[in-house]
Amino acid sequence: MVSVRFLLKDILFYPDDVLRKVSSPVESHEFGSPMKKFIEELYSSMDKANGIGLAAPQVGVLKNVLVYKTVGEKEEVNDYLINPKITYTEGNTLVEEGCLSLPGVFAKVPRSVKITIEAQDFEGKPFTKTTECFSSIVIQHETDHLVGKLFVDKLSLMKRKMLLTKYNRNSRRN
Ligand SMILES: [Zn+2]
């Protein structure tokens, strides 16, 4: 039995090459307690950065894992997906998004309203989930990270240029 460890880095920023790589599926020997620990670490990185979603490649781990915040009865609760696949989409919407890997810039991006996802829990048990609005948008944004896509890719060339110019100006200042 191989012992599995997932080593998190600090959140990577655009234009880091890792953000453009395609992540691999979590395999059967990687489920269980190391995965549970990894998810807890992802939650804590997301919280520290005041994010509402974080995908494993953003902390340098090229695995199909993402965490996000969802709205529970009274407060936001942490949730996660392993090996997520969006199997159904419905409706179109434009929502303003930002990204922990591109701090300080925001843009309206086209997304589906409602999605159905097939995924696994940390023990490898498969489940299906249908969600709308807030969680649906965050999950679409984070699943894009797993295939090396960023929200700016969904903008027109001109809008993307403007946004990245602003981003580059901000990062020079800091
Ligand atoms: Zn992001």
Image (cartoon, grey):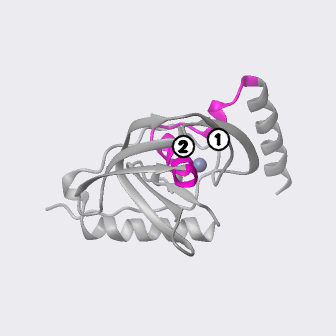
Circle 2 — which element? helix
Considering the whole magenta stretch, tell me its main secondary structure.
helix
* Screen quadrant of the N terminus: bottom left
In the depicted structure, whether residue 37 falls above or below residue 131: below
Amino acid type, residue under disc 2 in the picture: Leu
Q: Would you say the residues marked 1 and 2 are in contact, meaning their CB atoms lie under 8 Å apart? A: yes
**For disc 1, does the CB lie below 8 Å from ligand 1?**
no
Question: What residue is rendered at 63% in x and 37% in y?
Answer: 93
Instruction: Identify the mark at residue 32; answer none if there is no mark.
Output: none
Which amino acid type is shown beneath numbered disc 1? Pro
Of the pair 136 and 139, the residue shown nearer to us: 136
The correct choice, above or below, for 128 with respect to 122 in the image is above
Gap between marks 1 and 2, in whole Å? 7 Å
Q: What SS does tag 1 mark? A: loop
The residue depicted at 64 percent of the width and 41 percent of the height is 15
Locate residue 92 relative to residue 118 in the image: left or right. right
State whether residue 126 is above or below residue 33.
above
Q: Is mark 2 within 8 Å of ligand 1?
A: no
Q: Position of residue 168 (x, y in %)?
A: 79, 43
The magenta segment is 133-157
Task: Identify the residue shown where x is 41% and y is 48%.
Answer: 62
Q: Quadrant of residue 5?
A: bottom left
Name the residue beneath numbered marker 1.
15
Q: Is 138 included in the stretch rendered in magenta?
A: yes
Task: State the image coordinates of residue 16 (x, y, percent, origin top left).
Answer: 60, 44
Where is mark 2, residue-wise?
A: 19
In-image side of 100 versus 104 (left or right):
left
Please tell me which residue is depicted at 74% across the width and 46% down the height of the picture: 106
